Image: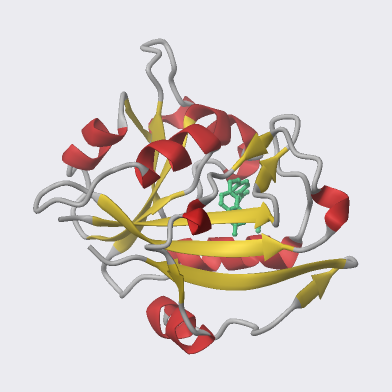
Amino acid sequence: MSRLTLIVAATKSNGIGLNGGLPWRLPKEMAYFAKATTHAPEGSTNRVIMGRNTWDSIPAKFRPLPNRHNTVLSRSSSFTVEGATAEIASSLNAALGSPSSTHIHRTFIIGGSTLYNESLALEASATAPFVDRILMTRVLDPAYEECDVHFPDFAADSEWKRTSHEDLEGWLGFEVPQGIQEEKGVKYEFQMWVRYC
Ligand code: FOL
């Protein structure tokens, strides 16, 4: 079974996006995203899988996300990425079945809402991929509650348990600021959630 990690920043009511982009600009939070998804043992690389709208939302100068194997999901056969440094797949299953790059350490689902929903709905089985971990940045500022795309209410599913901060750092392999963070007056917290299969 291949285990997938989902990474997301969401408000208390699970808002994740507004007008085709992130509702906030939090450089240190974004640096955490970059480090968490990039950090891998020498000689290996992580993979990020995203939907086409998420690809479009990433500033062109940061695409493909550097030092990570980028896979973009699109059902449209006419969708291409300039430079061809990202892989295009027609579905999550197709993407996961193509070992186009060897030495993949971890696979991260980076959004958006369609792909988050689809990947969280995958059932555990001996061979199929399964999301068993969520790196959640909880954005606590009520000013950002107005979002037009949302993350599923995963915590309503009691299989998900929040880990300790120590476990978060242990899994990531680097130190992470603990407790409520504040950047530009916006409070947020780095969390990790797991479920067993
Ligand atoms: N998860 C978390 N925790 N925070 C996020 O902002 C986030 N964003 C997405 C998915 N999961 C997330 C999807 N949106 C970039 C932009 C948008 C985006 C994901 C990534 C981006 O430009 N990333 C660059 C960082 C550039 C910088 O340092 O400003 C990268 O190299 O990862």
The one nearer the camera, 2 or 147, is: 147
Seen in the picture, residue 168 relative to 16 is either above or below; the reply is below
Residue 141 location, quadrant? bottom right
Where's the N terminus, which quadrant?
bottom left
The one nearer the camera, 65 or 183, is: 183
Q: How far across and down, in percent of the image, does residue 96 sit?
A: 23, 41
Q: Residue at x 49, y 84 (%)?
A: 164
Q: Residue furthest bottom?
A: 166
Q: How far across and down, in percent of the image, does residue 85 sit?
A: 40, 37
Residue 172 location, quadrant? bottom left
Q: Is residue 85 visible?
A: no
Seen in the picture, residue 184 relative to 15 is either above or below; the reply is below
Q: Does 119 sit left or right of 179 as displayed?
A: left
Q: How far across and down, in percent of the image, does residue 10 sit?
A: 65, 53
Q: Does 105 sit left or right of 181 as displayed?
A: left
Where's the C terminus, which quadrant?
bottom left
Q: Is residue 166 visible?
A: yes
Q: How far across and down, in percent of the image, does residue 185 sit?
A: 90, 67
Q: Residue furthest left?
A: 126
Q: Residue at x 46, y 78 (%)?
A: 163
Q: Residue at x 44, y 55 (%)?
A: 157
Q: How is the image coloured?
A: secondary structure
The one nearer the camera, 190 or 51, is: 190
Count of number-bearing discs: 0
